[in-house]
Image (cartoon, coloured by chain):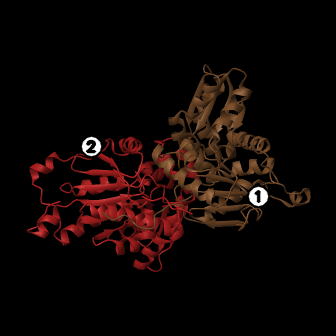
Chain colours: A brown, B red
Amino acid sequence: MKSEIRNPQSEILNFPIGIFDSGVGGLTVYRALHERLPAERFVYLGDTARVPYGTKSLSTVERYGIENAKFLEAQGIKLLVVACNTASALALPAIGNAVDIQVVGVIEPGARAAVEIAGGKAIAVIATEATVQSGAYAKAINQIDPHRKVIERACPLFVPLAEEGWANSEVARSVAEQYLQDLRDADLGALVLGCTHYPILRDLISEVVGDIALIDSGEAAAAEVRSLLESEQLRASQTTSELAERRLCDDLDHFYVTDAAERFAKVAERFLGTAPSVLEAVEVWGHDELRTY
Amino acid sequence: MKSEIRNPQSEILNFPIGIFDSGVGGLTVYRALHERLPAERFVYLGDTARVPYGTKSLSTVERYGIENAKFLEAQGIKLLVVACNTASALALPAIGNAVDIQVVGVIEPGARAAVEIAGGKAIAVIATEATVQSGAYAKAINQIDPHRKVIERACPLFVPLAEEGWANSEVARSVAEQYLQDLRDADLGALVLGCTHYPILRDLISEVVGDIALIDSGEAAAAEVRSLLESEQLRASQTTSELAERRLCDDLDHFYVTDAAERFAKVAERFLGTAPSVLEAVEVWGHDELRTY
């Protein structure tokens, strides 16, 4: 970090954008952000020591989310994106209270995009158990349109299928049919992919549910982040020639994980076609002293 | 706890047996112990806040294992069973060093049982990614018979399938075929179920691999615990009339989870046909102060 800041605003706009996820799934959000904002640098934290969040409780997800957010804030970021749907659904207010930077989750952008595209019809949301139990998507949709019908459904096997690299397998097809086949006839206006892993299964989901608009909440959040940076004049000031050099996972984007960096790199390769150039394992929690009983 | 102990040995033998697992899977080991040792009381800890361990690193699994073991030791137990295969494979020495009670894992009992039954033929082991990477089963088997051929294979989708209650589904059958079909012709003497969840899929696995002896490491560990208690004269002294009253999950057995007790009770019901009478959420780590950067 610089020892002296002469022009805080011009410093801040070249700070990176922070992204955290429970693990590797948020890389789909990183990709969406990178595509829309090629001049920006990113700091990504995957909480691989405690993944998944989707089966955990409100208080635990809040605690994990705050620890992750504080770690990223300490890296010097201008904005925090909570890429994880579960953390966005359960812990966004707690995270917002815990840090001094602006925080963007994926639920509200996803909900807005779904309402816009659904043309008055019902909206289905597929997500983790915790996100579905929180009812966060239904609340966000009904805040925009109180009478809109929302169907929420947990699809817990989609995450391990995506991580296993079985997104296009016959097994994944059977699982998707089991979870989603009845939605084909539900006269939906939109289906929200309410978990960062689900875009990996996008083609398969689309085949099973038929001709319904799929909303990727990560894409919707990335669009919102771009608008926000523009309206607050916080876009990075890289030149065009520098931009031409940027590519996904290059060494200007820093990746941190709380465990098992090797496995993260392997799954990143599967999701993005490339592994991070800069990847480091860190601890984000205060466990220095073991509790004594 | 009693303030004064007049006869330490007779006190200790009525202490409960501690069991920990990364989550709910260790309930299959609890059941095996309960069946063989109906006079014993059990204290079970499921680390549901940090489950699963099977995709995590050595150092992380060691840290989690030590925290769990210390929590159970503080409850006053006479023996600790590490029901989790991953924790047994990666962290047994570290756990043994961290506590003053005797610690029994599931790897060595499973390996011994497999060698005994396999009659000189090759042994296959199915387990989590971390257990397979550790090579712990192959080491344990080759310590008994250095020339025995061991095939180790990770089956990561089995855990979510068992937890989802899909053990007998067509989807589970396709997954099992994908993972295991070639083992049918491998001329195996035994197949070790090297993860606490896998006994839930036992019938299905058996159909796919054909006529091969399946070894449940949890069952093998339970048998070993009984021998150990007998040889050290540590079996509980309940009377026959008291025993007749005991049933699985009654209020003499205490269950702790680190998160989401409700979900644990639901999956326990699915695994054991009954939910714990005494179930409490606890914290086993020293996270009281968030780290500051």
Is residue A82 left or right of B251 when viewed as pictured? right
**At numbered mark 2, what does the secondary structure look like: helix, strand or loop?**
loop
Residue B95, can we see it?
A: yes
Q: Quadrant of residue A267?
A: bottom right
Residue at x 74%, y 57% (from the top left corner): A15
Judge if badges 2 and 1 mark residues of a common chain.
no
What mark, if any, has residue B277 been given in the picture? 2
Residue at x 64%, y 47% (from the top left corner): A83
Q: Quadrant of residue B98?
A: bottom left
Q: Is A163 in front, or is A282?
A: A282
**Residue B13 location in percent, x, y?**
16, 64
Q: Quadrant of residue A51?
A: bottom right
Name which residue type carries label 1: Glu
**Closer mark to the observer between disc 2 and disc 1:** 1
**Residue A2 location in percent, x, y?**
72, 67
Dot 1: few (<14), some (14–19), or many (≥20) neighbours within 10 Å? Answer: some
Is residue A224 left or right of A148 when viewed as pictured? right
Q: Residue reaching furthest right? A: A241
Residue at x 85%, y 57% (from the top left corner): A238
**Residue A277 location in percent, x, y?**
73, 66
Q: Is B172 in front, or is A234?
A: A234
Q: Give the chain of mark 2.
A: B
Residue A43 vs A83, above or below: the answer is: below
Is residue A171 left or right of B144 when viewed as pictured? right
Q: Give the chain of mark 1.
A: A
Q: Which residue position holds label 1?
A: A11
**At numbered mark 1, what does the secondary structure look like: helix, strand or loop?**
helix
Residue at x 58%, y 27% (from the top left corner): A151
Q: CA distance from mark 2 to mark 1?
A: 58 Å
Name which residue type carries label 2: Ser
